[in-house]
Image (tube, grey):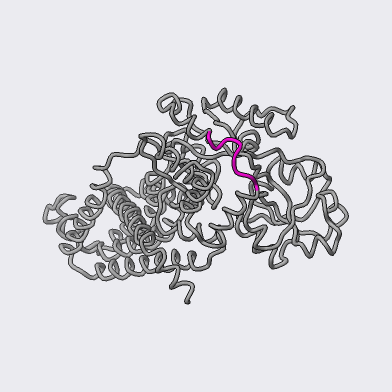
Amino acid sequence: MEALLTTFNERRGALGQAILEHLQISLLALLLAILIAVPLAIVIKERPRARQFVLQMSAVVQTIPSLAILGLLIPLVGIGTVPAIIALVVYALFPILQNTLTGFMEIDPALEEAAEAFGMTRWEKLRKFQLALAMPVLMSGVRTAAVSIIGTATLAALIGAGGLGSFILLGIDRHDTSLILLGAIFSALLAIIFNYVIGWLEHQLLRRIVLSFLALILVVVASYVPVMGQSGPDLVIGGKLGAEPEILINMYEQLLEAETDLEVAVKPNFGKTTFVFEAVQNGDIDIYPEFSGTVINSLLTAPPTDLTNDPRQVYEAAREHILQEYEMAYLEPLAFQNTYALAVRRDFAEAHDLATISDLKALEDDLVAGFTLEFADREDGNKGLQALYGLDMEVATMEPALRYQAIANDEVQVIDAYSTDSQLISYDLVLLEDDRQLFLPYQGAPLLLADTLAEYPEIEPVLNQLAGRISEEEMQAMNYAVDVEDRPAREVAREYLQGAGFLE
């Protein structure tokens, strides 16, 4: 409890911002879902075939995993708030639509017959009694949708839309229970508040419900007016989830603002490589640090096959091919290599005399490996371990941060890791030598559209000052400062730049 209160006090400002972002996304999604579902239900309520078809389709769409919907939307509408809201609306439509139709269907047929006898039109029936009688059931559907939206909105943080999910993701990445609890507790509180307020509205008169709905519209519009009136920065620098990308993007931002007239913003903690890469292609962000091995193995559709493990050759191939295929510029790389590696606990390595990956062969029948989904499916990952090393271990796939907890608890005996991970220090793990050179070099460098570089040519000489700088030991120490000592990435980045003579 003490750790939770300490984290709360330290991050009150960021937490308040995350709550506001979560409310903005949730309220707008709920408003749009109501505006779509209720009129649609009114149109189809007396058309049995259309009613059945629409309900079935909305139910089927709701079964699609939310992460899959986000992944499908990013190439179409980019990252940030827009795809998050679209996904949330998709999930909210079914309960509102179903309950609205149920409310209309439960109206006493005698009332309908009496209304027709008096010569009422469809609109008059709707206005005079249908909507009022259906409203309690309709509002029950809105309540269900609202709670669902607030819970699902935590995934918005994966694509740069912010919200309370950013605390949960950051907590998982840094093994910080307090951060996870803050995100989860306040998300649950919002859901409880929404549930209570909408539950109270279920029993109110139609006039009060309509006025509340109009108030919701005003609140949502008012919350977005300041955002629409703001001019954006010249450049947005994004980064994947983790301490290392966040440190690097803060270095880029501080260098560019110190040595150019550009206004720069940073967007850390994107969940997946594909998310941040497509964000650059769509123009939602302008620059992000990417690794040469990732460019070769994950981003190119036809990667070169004649590469050695020479870092410069891999970088040059990555720069040449990414420019040809995507018209992207890949600036000069840093010194350190954050390459893939296999790690085991030190006591396990000493007990079984393990020094190289090849040494695992003798133990493969008794090993459980904890690999990320990406590593498990890569040619320079588990597929390469099987082909090049002949290793056929039992594999459990999991999110990156969780594999360290798994090996600490002896649930797995070997994991994939990055060579600069701070957790290698925290959990006292040792890296096994890649004695058959499966893993390509992974040097980090700024990746951006060639058009962006043409528009702002001053970017290149400024960021290339970091070329050949930062050793693996320095990067690991900086990651440790952020992950374990809980220091702000911005502060750690500035400290390095000042120590290296880049900033005063």
**Residue 380 x/y as whole percent:** 71, 41
Q: Residue at x 29, y 61 (%)?
A: 138
Q: State the residue at coordinates (31%, 70%).
A: 196
- Residue drawn at (72%, 48%), measured in percent from left and top? 341
Task: Give left or right: position of 362 versus 280.
Answer: right
Q: 361 above or below 304?
A: below
* Magenta stretch holds residue 470: yes
**Front in this rendered view, residue 337 or 242:** 337
Which residue of the protein is positioned furthest toward the left in this rendering?
118
| Residue 387 image offset from top left, x and y in percent | 80, 41
Residue 22 placement: quadrant: bottom left
Most extreme residue toward the right, as rendered? 362
Left or right of 422 in this view: 102: left
Q: Which residues are magenta?
A: 465-472
* Main secondary-structure element of the magenta-colored stretch: loop
Question: Quick check: is 432 in the magenta stretch?
Answer: no
The residue at the point 79 percent across, 53 percent down is 393
Taking the view exactly as shown, the residue that stands out farthest to the bottom is 1
Q: Is residue 86 visible?
A: yes
* Left or right: residue 438 compared with residue 138: right
233 or 35, which lies in front? Answer: 233
Image spot of residue 124 (x, y percent): 14, 53
The image quadrant of residue 209 is bottom left
